[in-house]
Amino acid sequence: MSTPRSIAFIGLGIMGLPMAKNLVRAGYSVAGYNLMPEAITRLAEAGGTAAASIADAVKDADTVIVMVPDSPDVQQVLLADDGVFANARPGALVIDMSTIRPDVAREVAQAGAERGFRVLDAPVSGGEAGAVEAKLSIMVGGSEADFAAARPVFDVLGSTPVLVGPSGAGQTVKAANQLIVAGNIQLVAEALVFLEAHGVDTKAGLEVLNGGLAGSTVMTRKTDALRNRDFTPGFRIALHDKDMKIVTQAAREAGVAIPLGALVAQFVGALKAQGHGGLDHSALLKIVEQLSSAEKA
Amino acid sequence: MSTPRSIAFIGLGIMGLPMAKNLVRAGYSVAGYNLMPEAITRLAEAGGTAAASIADAVKDADTVIVMVPDSPDVQQVLLADDGVFANARPGALVIDMSTIRPDVAREVAQAGAERGFRVLDAPVSGGEAGAVEAKLSIMVGGSEADFAAARPVFDVLGSTPVLVGPSGAGQTVKAANQLIVAGNIQLVAEALVFLEAHGVDTKAGLEVLNGGLAGSTVMTRKTDALRNRDFTPGFRIALHDKDMKIVTQAAREAGVAIPLGALVAQFVGALKAQGHGGLDHSALLKIVEQLSSAEKA
Amino acid sequence: MSTPRSIAFIGLGIMGLPMAKNLVRAGYSVAGYNLMPEAITRLAEAGGTAAASIADAVKDADTVIVMVPDSPDVQQVLLADDGVFANARPGALVIDMSTIRPDVAREVAQAGAERGFRVLDAPVSGGEAGAVEAKLSIMVGGSEADFAAARPVFDVLGSTPVLVGPSGAGQTVKAANQLIVAGNIQLVAEALVFLEAHGVDTKAGLEVLNGGLAGSTVMTRKTDALRNRDFTPGFRIALHDKDMKIVTQAAREAGVAIPLGALVAQFVGALKAQGHGGLDHSALLKIVEQLSSAEKA
Amino acid sequence: MSTPRSIAFIGLGIMGLPMAKNLVRAGYSVAGYNLMPEAITRLAEAGGTAAASIADAVKDADTVIVMVPDSPDVQQVLLADDGVFANARPGALVIDMSTIRPDVAREVAQAGAERGFRVLDAPVSGGEAGAVEAKLSIMVGGSEADFAAARPVFDVLGSTPVLVGPSGAGQTVKAANQLIVAGNIQLVAEALVFLEAHGVDTKAGLEVLNGGLAGSTVMTRKTDALRNRDFTPGFRIALHDKDMKIVTQAAREAGVAIPLGALVAQFVGALKAQGHGGLDHSALLKIVEQLSSAEKA
């Protein structure tokens, strides 16, 4: 199995562009394509190649990376007549790093395999900062051989690529991630408003909580923002809302009850409905305040 | 302000006895009293003094520590005719380290102050291991002067004593701790059953989750027990149920909504009702399994 | 067993005064007492007797009715040195029609029995209108003999007195009533905001729903108020909040999970915390609106 | 506008067959088609006409009624090359009485209108008994003219056809119906287990509750089944689970929070996951029991 050399990168958004640049920097030949051409130009300025279409991008690539917003985008990019599977070289490694529905990930992996492609789902966590600093966590679904083949690319993009199961498993783990993160933020927000209402020194209080069994990365990273009501993203409510829809649906289909997950999904959805889709997900605190005594919170 | 020298320790249970022994070891004179006399004997064997009653224990102490199960126990120990306030030396420092209702903590602090005592509420987290190894987190409510006076004692018992506000604030922070911990366990349990139902490698999957924003001390310490369904305590459901009652009531009285907290309190209560009060709180996983597909979970 | 003739009525508020007047109208001799003397005067004007104290009211009564706001009030009225049990004639029938905690109802019944009184708990539903029009539903806990003895009085006050079990059972049924009512209002509110957001004719829509399995007395009586956002009480959020506390606590003590009840209790508490304690309980709609898209609801 | 005379009926299941027979009985010419031919035979025996295909059924009909299980079935029946729109007479009235997603109802109405058909969505409630006895509640979305044209047919099938808005509105109201019904059953189940745990006479207790503001059609029809744990359907959990998915998704898309609805949807889904999809929806009581003390419930 040869090491990837020539990469097509489809989707050069907030996450995709810095990831593609990191690959250029690591010595790969990267042909990029994006719906909005400006990002293609920026990749070319950084040493990549500007592709005129998906077909153009993938025609010589041994590896194709896809990083687009949602399930229908991935289906379009991979399955359409002018898409990846119809135009890439047989046997190419196709890595979808978007966050999408696990069942769609399985479906496109199957469609790709039928045409001779090796397909991985490999969603990430770590946000824009993780993409820029090459510190993404990468959760991978697919075969061991394909994971091993993709490993050099993953090592450029992040620090902890982990194979968690067959096709779709990466997306399933990402869905679980979003469930836990939303729930943790909500719990810390409930605790914070509770402490404020009792006149507790919340800086000292949350610090001591974070030192014990209640401690979490959410508390470490989000406490200051929560205390200051600074909801600059970070990770947007609108995207987290999409992800909560994925996890509630996938849980339902698997016959798994996620009562806390389903309730916090209501609150994430409520924030989006209130027009706060552009705020950081720590804005769940707003829900707790809305439901609590005005004079105290 | 003089350093504490002579300590009365009321309540020598699973937590209290090792704490009292640590104080003996640190050079304090410790007179212990407990309802069950066996524990008193064990403290005496370790170099403490056996007291015949609360009055006997406190009569020469400059510092009184109370470590009993619940709010009514604290009221009894401090307020009864044969209790601490009626028999201790005026001006003594009274430190209640039990986990009780914040309003009761305020009430007994007030009652103590009226009789010339200096009262702190100082609940702990860290469990039996933390008590034995002197690594308790200590959340303190009261005045800065009294906290400073108690500091040498706290430093013997744990690593991070923090003054979080006036009387009752320690209990409030402990209540918030129990809310977050129960919620986190439930979220990790929902995620784990969800991942199992999808055939994901849960060891690898939870490891990668713990490395990102979903990471928590609960995940670090409880993942193996959750994966193996090993619910040996640790911290018992029956006690966590008592604590969830404290936090839901304190939230209600403060006009704060804790919807996730209230829901997980139902599940902790359900486990206790099912006869699982003696299991570790990680047994919340049982609730998720009961609500999910039998063949998968 | 003789028919009641001479009644002491303690507590002449919004509910108690019209109930006492109905008993006067039915031919009973009614001595009334109330903390605020104005209500006593109004009862006297209607043909009752003004009592100067509880002791004065009960001294010649064969039947004592209590109608006060909350558990501590009932304990005070019945158990205090100047209260009912210390001053009423031995063997008198004592009927507590307040809505209080089931455990307190059992406790005062026990205390009364030890002193030779026959005690019933008999909370009502139907509100001020039901009290004025003598159409209250009455849920009674106690013995069959005492229920039979009280029956003529109940028949004056309402239409459907039902013996539902031993002491405390009346309060337990009332608690279940408040759980179902709060839940039903919340469900209808969720459905209404959902229908509005979809541009449905809500008058026609709720009418057809009320004709089928979704139909309820809440829908029959509250739909217009909900559609018009007219939250004039009716039954106040502040009282319903007290009652939700009773039912959640009683459920917890019995080891019964009430997840929907616990969640709607959060929302009732949220309304009270927001300063809406004086609104009708149909104001739960406000919670649904707060959590939903502003432009639609 | 002419009165319907000749009807094609697609979907002769538990609901469809008795509805089609009622139309035959009322004097209509009814050509029936069903995937399983046995039902077609039974309609023919009752005086209808056996069709060999959808195209055969609709070719002479002025009115087409569709009664199939789920959204994809409706799309298939109406939109496929061998389906209704491709084969029916231009201008025919097409009435979809299935319970499906509101957005799919709007989509097929739009597709039909573009080809010159008049389309109504007209889901029903009342179950098999309502279909047999012609007592269905019918919630209709579409234009006033089309509703008027369909009125004679609706009057044969049920008692209360109501036009609730434009295309999709019928399905939206049906979705709200399923939300309220599931919630009410859960609330009554919580109340019942609560009353049982307290040793209350539940027959008398629920009777008095049903006479007041807590009263509902659910309580009237389901109390005996709930008390006896008789979960013979009735309306199956598997179908209610499909409907809860519809309402949670439609609420999310409209930006409406339905926290109680989302929570009870988890419990309906849990029952299905446990293998209880074939039980009546009153089996929600099982969830309450699972979460409550074993010895009491």
Image (tube, coloured by chain):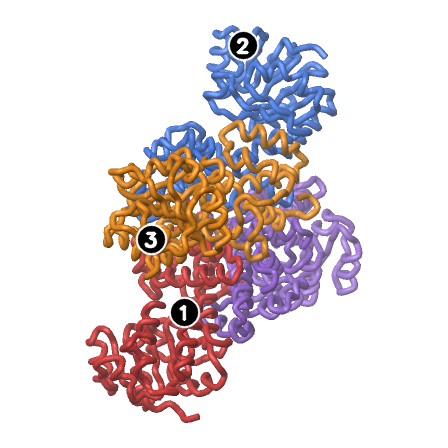
Chain colours: A orange, B blue, C purple, D red
Classify residue D9 by image quadrant: bottom left
The residue lying toward the viewer, choosing from A265 and B277, is A265
Determine crowd level at label 3: few under 14, some 14-19, many 20+ residues with C-alpha closer than 10 A: some
Residue D20, x across and y down, in percent = 31, 81
Task: Kindly indicate whether the residues beneath marks 2 and 1 are on one polypeptide chain.
Answer: no
- Amino acid at dot 1: Val
Q: Which residue is mark 3?
A: A103
Residue D216, x across and y down, in percent = 48, 65
The residue lying toward the viewer, choosing from D251 and A200, is D251
What chain letter is assigned to the residue under label 2? B
Q: Is residue B151 above or below residue B227?
A: above
Q: Which residue is mark 2?
A: B50
**Outermost residue, bottom direction?**
D2
Q: Which residue is mark 1?
A: D104
What chain letter is assigned to the residue under label 1? D
Q: Label 3 to label 1, Cα distance in Å?
A: 21 Å
B58 on left or right of D140 = right
Task: Kindly indicate whether the residues beneath marks 3 and 1 are on one polypeptide chain.
Answer: no
- Amino acid at dot 3: Asp
A224 on left or right of D257 = right
Task: Kindly indicate whether the residues beneath marks 3 and 2 are on one polypeptide chain.
Answer: no
C111 on left or right of B215 = right
Q: Label 3 to label 2, Cα distance in Å?
A: 67 Å
Residue B175, x across and y down, in percent = 56, 34
**Residue B62 can be seen in this image:** yes
Q: Which residue is depicted at the point 51% across and 28% down?
A: A212
Classify residue C296 by image quadrant: bottom right
A36 on left or right of C123 = left
- Amino acid at dot 2: Ala
